[in-house]
């Protein structure tokens, strides 16, 4: 083989190697472009579901205008006095809106004539009773009065000639309705509309659709005590039944012994009792030693029946300036100190002894849930609580959704899962349903929908996949992928440059030969 043949053979081998190298580089580039880059993009691109921003903003702006509370009050009057209703309605509206102009077109009482389908347990009824002036001048003239039933929503108004003759019955009716029956609700609604905090002492528990009620008997020493708590809880069942549209309540009870006080009370010889000063109530509950922690995701309302050791010595323990010997702990629960002479009255706490305690706990529960203090009727209080809490829930739902939108707009790299979008859409759906039912007068159903709207807005904001991605910026991605992509890109780039260099060299050689 001549030298020329050898040279030609080397050139052919070199040419074939060059072709293979070019093919390899070309294939690698194709893999990178059509497989690597799409795969990298799909694995690193953050999914951001499209949220209904327009709907949330529209509801936030027009929520106040969409809501119209209309509370029907049925007047039990003769048919001949039906003409009295429009005049009384006009005076009632004037009285409300002159004092609370922010409630106009938002909250109203509608006076109606009673019919056969109205029930005092479900509807507001006002019955009138007329007492004429006595014929005998020596007899004292009767006075106007009213009585709000503590067992229903019925109110009886007694009128006399003092209001009948000057035609002031409508004025007396408006006073009873606005200053006694609905006074607490009107004030709370006014504060909500104006954005003012009605709960100045921060007593009210944050709203939840589920609560744990924990009733504890704490004994200061280790002597065994029996209490008929199961029987006494029957008084709570009716309250929970009436509140079933508001929230679900789970009740548990327990007994704990050796629950000693951090600061024992001093004995007052003049009162023959141990006295706990008002200044010492803040340290009464020994959170460090008493096992009062409930490991549950739902908020707990705690009620403590404290049994002092002094009961075995026939010496009561009293709270200073307390008629019920109890006190309230804001956003936590209530405490009742139970006194009983164990030497003469036995060692058990029976149902009759627990009934006054349960009444105190019920009163404390109402305060912790945010019910108005007046009137005494639990039915009216629960109604007022439902209506005010419905509006609070709707406002809070929209605030949660607005906060979610602000978060997603400010963090462009945060993930928005499809589940978050579903929760947002559900929240808006229940919000709209709640408003519709509210405007139709179905306040209990509206309360349920508002609770579901709030619950879904919370789920949307705290959806775990979105929260996990909130702290995964692009710098983290660079730190993860640079060790992998750096060497690969450098090798491919050098190979590609070498191929380009070979192509240019071949072209230059051909030009020279020509």
Image (cartoon, rainbow, N blue to C red):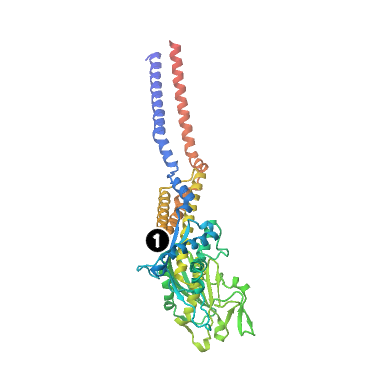
Residue 5 vs residue 357, the one in the foreground: 357
Name of the residue lying farthest toward the bottom = 344
> Can the viewer see residue 395?
yes
Name of the residue lying farthest toward the left = 116
Report x, y in % for residue 200: 57, 63
| Quadrant in the picture for residue 253 | bottom left
Report x, y in % for residue 508: 46, 15
Residue 375 lies, with reference to residue 63, above or below; the image says below
**Neighbour class for label 1 at 10 Å: few (<14), some, many (≥20)?**
few
Q: Is residue 327 left or right of residue 296?
A: right
Image quarter of the N terminus: top left
Report x, y in % for residue 451: 43, 59
Q: Is residue 433 left or right of residue 339?
A: left
Residue 460 lies, with reference to residue 499, above or below; the image says below
Report x, y in % for residue 115: 36, 67
Residue 333 vs residue 291, the one in the foreground: 333
Identify the residue position indicated by label 1 in the image: 442
Residue 162 vs residue 206, the one in the foreground: 162
Q: Is residue 117 left or right of residue 183?
A: left
Name of the residue lying farthest toward the top = 514
Residue 498 lies, with reference to residue 171, above or below; the image says above
Tag 1's secondary structure? loop
Residue 222 vs residue 102, the one in the foreground: 102
Residue 96 lies, with reference to residue 483, above or below; the image says below
| Quadrant in the picture for residue 4 | top left
Image quarter of the C terminus: top left
């Amino acid at each position: 083989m001549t030298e020329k043949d050898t040279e030609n053979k080397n050139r052919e081998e070199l040419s074939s190697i060059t072709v293979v190298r070019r093919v390899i580089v070309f294939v690698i580039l194709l893999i990178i472009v059509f497989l690597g880059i799409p795969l990298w993009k799909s694995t690193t691109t953050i999914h951001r579901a499209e949220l209904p921003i327009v709907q949330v903003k529209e509801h936030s702006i027009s929520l106040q205008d969409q809501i119209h509370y209309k509370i029907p009050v049925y007047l039990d009057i003769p048919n001949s006095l039906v003409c009295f209703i429009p005049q009384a309605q006009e005076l009632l509206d004037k009285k409300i809106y002159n004092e609370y102009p922010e409630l106009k077109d938002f909250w109203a009482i509608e006076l109606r004539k009673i019919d056969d389908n109205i029930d005092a347990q479900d509807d507001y009824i006002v019955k009138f009773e007329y007492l004429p002036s006595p014929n005998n001048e020596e007899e004292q003239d009767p006075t106007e009065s009213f009585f709000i039933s503590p067992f229903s929503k019925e109110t009886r108004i007694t009128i006399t000639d003092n209001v009948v003759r000057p035609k002031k019955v409508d004025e007396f009716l408006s006073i009873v309705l606005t200053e006694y029956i609905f006074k607490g609700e009107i004030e709370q609604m006014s504060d909500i509309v104006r954005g003012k905090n009605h709960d100045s002492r921060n007593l009210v528990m944050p709203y939840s659709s589920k609560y744990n009620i924990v009733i504890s008997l704490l004994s200061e020493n280790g002597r065994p005590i029996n209490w008929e708590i199961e029987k006494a809880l029957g008084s709570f069942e009716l309250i929970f039944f009436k509140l079933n549209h508001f929230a679900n309540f789970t009740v548990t009870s327990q007994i704990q012994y050796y629950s000693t006080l951090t600061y024992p009370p001093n004995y007052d010889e003049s009162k023959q009792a141990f006295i706990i000063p008002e200044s010492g109530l803040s340290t009464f509950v020994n959170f460090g030693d008493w096992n009062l922690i409930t490991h549950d995701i739902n908020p707990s309302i705690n009620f403590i029946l404290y049994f002092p050791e002094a009961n075995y010595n026939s010496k009561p323990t009293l709270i200073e300036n307390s008629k019920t010997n109890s006190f309230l702990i804001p956003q936590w629960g209530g405490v009742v100190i139970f006194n009983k002479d164990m030497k003469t009255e036995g060692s058990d706490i029976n149902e009759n002894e627990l009934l006054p305690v349960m009444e105190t706990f019920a009163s404390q529960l109402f305060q912790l849930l945010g019910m108005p203090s007046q009137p005494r009727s639990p039915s009216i209080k629960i109604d007022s609580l439902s209506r005010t809490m419905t509006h609070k829930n709707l406002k809070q739902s929209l605030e949660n959704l607005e906060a979610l939108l602000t978060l997603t707009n400010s963090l462009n790299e945060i993930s928005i899962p499809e589940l978050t979008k579903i929760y947002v859409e559900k929240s808006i759906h229940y919000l709209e349903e709640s408003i519709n039912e509210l405007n139709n007068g179905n306040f209990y159903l509206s309360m349920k929908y508002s609770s579901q709207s709030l619950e879904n807005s919370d789920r949307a904001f705290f959806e775990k996949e979105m929260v996990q991605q909130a702290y995964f910026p692009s710098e983290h991605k660079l730190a993860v992928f640079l060790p992998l992509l750096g060497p690969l890109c450098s090798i491919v780039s050098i190979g590609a440059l070498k191929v380009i260099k070979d192509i240019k060299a071949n072209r230059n050689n051909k030009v020279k030969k020509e």
